[in-house]
Image (spheres, helix red, strand yellow):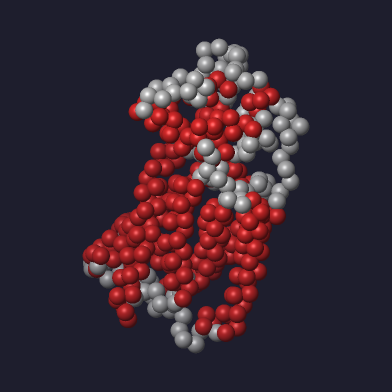
Amino acid sequence: MDDFGLAEAPPLSALTIAFATMFYAAAAILFLGLLIQTVRLAWRTARSGGITVPETPAETTLPGRAVRLASEVFLLRSTFFADRWAWIFGAAFHFGLLLVLVRHLRYMLEPAWLGPLWKLVIWAQPFGVYGGIALPLGAAAWWIRQAWLGDRRILDSRIDRIVLALLIAIPLIGYVNTYVRTDVIAVKGFMLGLLTFDLKPLPSDPVLLAHLWLVALLMILLPFSRLLLLIPLGSMLHLPAVLVAGPGSWRRSPNFIWTAVVLLLALLGPPAVIAAAQVGKDGVRPVPRFAGLVDAHRTDDSTVMIRFHPKFLLTHRVAVVRQGAQAPNDNIERCVSCHAVNGADGTPVAYDDPKHFCGSCHLRAAVAVDCFECHNSRIPKQESALPSATRFAALPGRTEGRIRP
């Protein structure tokens, strides 16, 4: 038991250990493959005289070459002049991917690490939503155009097509995950645990597990695909056989194919089986009845309010503001009263204080909250509507980022 009377965190489940092992292996393959392919590209570029961009006049000065390279990487300049449709689809794909990666920084970083710069992560969250729309649409449109081009297409291997399909499926499943609701703070704890080698429990939500499993598959396959270099270089990649192998190459050999299949099954098979067993054991979590949600989050599943409180608050807002119905016990003032946290002076802190019950979670999750633009974020008195033991019992073993001394 800790200082708040809460139960200690339970031991790590087989699901958490399996997915952590899977991500460590996938990250090792990704970074090693990236290093090998970068060396291969540099070696082949030196042998062939460099990557040629089909535009004249060519830059001769070092600053000019740097600017030209930056315009190719960040603006896809040569693609714009060569093929406008490819530029539109490619730009949607590239910038959508960039915005999605920036949005997911909230899972990899802590506000204390960035200080004031954390506000940029919060500010970028809505743009990441739009990037998640542009990424699969741009990838799908570009894929269709590649199939239309026939002999002139860039991607022609099965791995390339699988990687492109993953880049379409992963953001779509991510969107589904936002509607089925998961514990964002728990997911962030798991990801930070991977980075700091201090594992935290992974939620067993089926959509989340499918999303993470596909991400690991993408990390494993990306080093063997031409997309690894196509993503940053775009149409600058004009070297033949940099990553596209010929009919008799090692990538088409049966020994390589069977070895790859065995490795994929060994790395991804156990996490998939364990995840399926855990999901089957937990069953489908029903959507709570919002009329009794305030009581349910204290007596039943402690994660109910964590996952569904946004929808509960929006539903309650519609009922109160538009329909004129209001229950005396179900209001945001009662939420603030129950979860009040006192500051150094002994009075409840406001939302802009990092110790605030709501602010501590939303700050870590990089979620902007507009509730307290109208409502008071603290009660005028130190007393709370519920005893401390009842308040803190709602979150067993989950003090980090929520309840602080």
- Is 179 on the left or on the right of 266, as rendered? left
The residue at the point 50 percent across, 66 percent down is: 222
**In this view of the protein, which residue sits in the foreground, 189 or 296?**
296
**In this view of the protein, which residue sits in the foreground, 125 or 177?**
177
The residue at the point 39 percent across, 74 percent down is: 155
Q: Residue 244 location, x and y as percent?
A: 44, 77
- Residue 48 appearing in the image: no
- Residue 136 appearing in the image: yes
**In this view of the protein, which residue sits in the foreground, 336 or 250?**
336
The correct choice, above or below, for 40 with respect to 179 in the image is below
- Is 230 on the left or on the right of 199, as rendered? left
* Residue furthest right as drawn: 1
Q: Residue 99 location, x and y as percent?
A: 40, 50
The residue at the point 24 percent across, 64 percent down is: 84
The correct choice, above or below, for 171 with respect to 356 in the image is below
Quarter of the image with the C terminus is: top right
The correct choice, above or below, for 20 with respect to 310 in the image is below
Quarter of the image with the N terminus is: top right
Q: Residue 71 location, x and y as percent?
A: 31, 57
* Residue furthest bottom as drawn: 248
Q: Residue 270 location, x and y as percent?
A: 66, 64
Q: Quadrant of residue 86?
A: bottom left
The correct choice, above or below, for 272 with respect to 352 in the image is below
Give the total number of marks visible in the rendering.
0
The residue at the point 25 percent across, 67 percent down is: 83
